[in-house]
Amino acid sequence: MNGDGLYVYAVVREGTALPDGAGGVGDPPATLRTVGAGKVAAVVSNAPARLRARRRDLLAHQDLLMGLAERGPVLPMRFGMVAPDEDALLAQLTAAETSHLATLKNLDGHVEVNVKALPAPDSLARVVIEDATVRRLRDEARRRPGYEASVRLGEAVASALARRASEAGREVLRELAPLARAAATGPDVQGCAINTSFLVPRTHSDRFRRTTERLAEARRSHVDIRFAGPLPCYSFVGDSGVPSRPTAVAGG
């Protein structure tokens, strides 16, 4: 091992095979291996001297996680997780073995599907027709044009669009919920009214996608529904990190 620590991709059950031909982050791609403790193991590689969030590394990280998921449940790590050394990693795996096994059991046979709700494009005309406040501020701006009137109108339009998207998005989420085992609210995303991830049985992921597409089409005048998945189950692992030192990750 070099002096830059161990880059940690995931925790899996001991004995889980690595995907054929998979490589890790870095250029050239780092060689993958497992570090086991009891009934769990971490998938690792030597960490690059300068870890950067380059597209090829982000894809290598996610492709490996999806390949591992074909072989069993995966507790995925976020991009950039580095353990200072193998001893620290083994200590964490040993201390958290029971928790990790419970998480892996919970995720077994499932994938994550993310659903975002954004204001519908080209819906301004409908908002003006339906929202009395927007109509009033538009008329005021026409009678007395100026910076403040334009700002008030712009804020009202943005608020109305977000409210319509949120209401329609919540309707979609209510209909999707019975198709999933669990749901988790994601972080705020600029311009996004709703950001929710679902824990979906892998065997039902196609049905979930088709249902999402149908619901999105039925409400496209109010909301733009965006669907991403299947994904590694990042949103359903709880506080399951590994000991790490601060790692500077830059875009590139």
Image: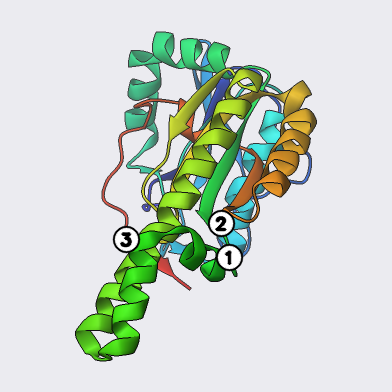
Vertical side of 173 occupied by 145: above or below = below
In this view of the protein, which residue sits in the foreground, 81 or 171? 171
> Which residue matches tag 2?
58
In this view of the protein, which residue sits in the foreground, 70 or 95? 70
Contact between marks 2 and 3 (CB within 8 A): the answer is no
> Which residue matches tag 1?
55
Asked where in the image residue 52 lies, by quadrant, the reply is bottom left
Question: Residue at left 40%, top 44%?
Answer: 81
Question: Residue at left 38%, top 25%?
Answer: 238
Q: Secondary structure at mark 2?
A: helix
Look at label 1 and name its amino acid.
Arg
- Asked whether residue 8 is in view, the answer is no
Q: Which mark is residue 1?
A: none
Asked where in the image residue 185 lies, by quadrant, the reply is top left
Contact between marks 2 and 1 (CB within 8 A): the answer is yes
> Which residue matches tag 3?
248
Camera-side mark, 2 or 3: 2
Left-right relation of 48 to 5? right
Q: Residues within 10 Å of mark 1 (few under 14, many from 20)?
A: few
Distance in Å between CA atoms under marks 2 and 3: 15 Å
Question: Residue at left 36%, top 32%?
Answer: 242
Contact between marks 3 and 1 (CB within 8 A): the answer is no
Camera-side mark, 3 or 1: 1
Sequence-first disc among 3 and 1: 1
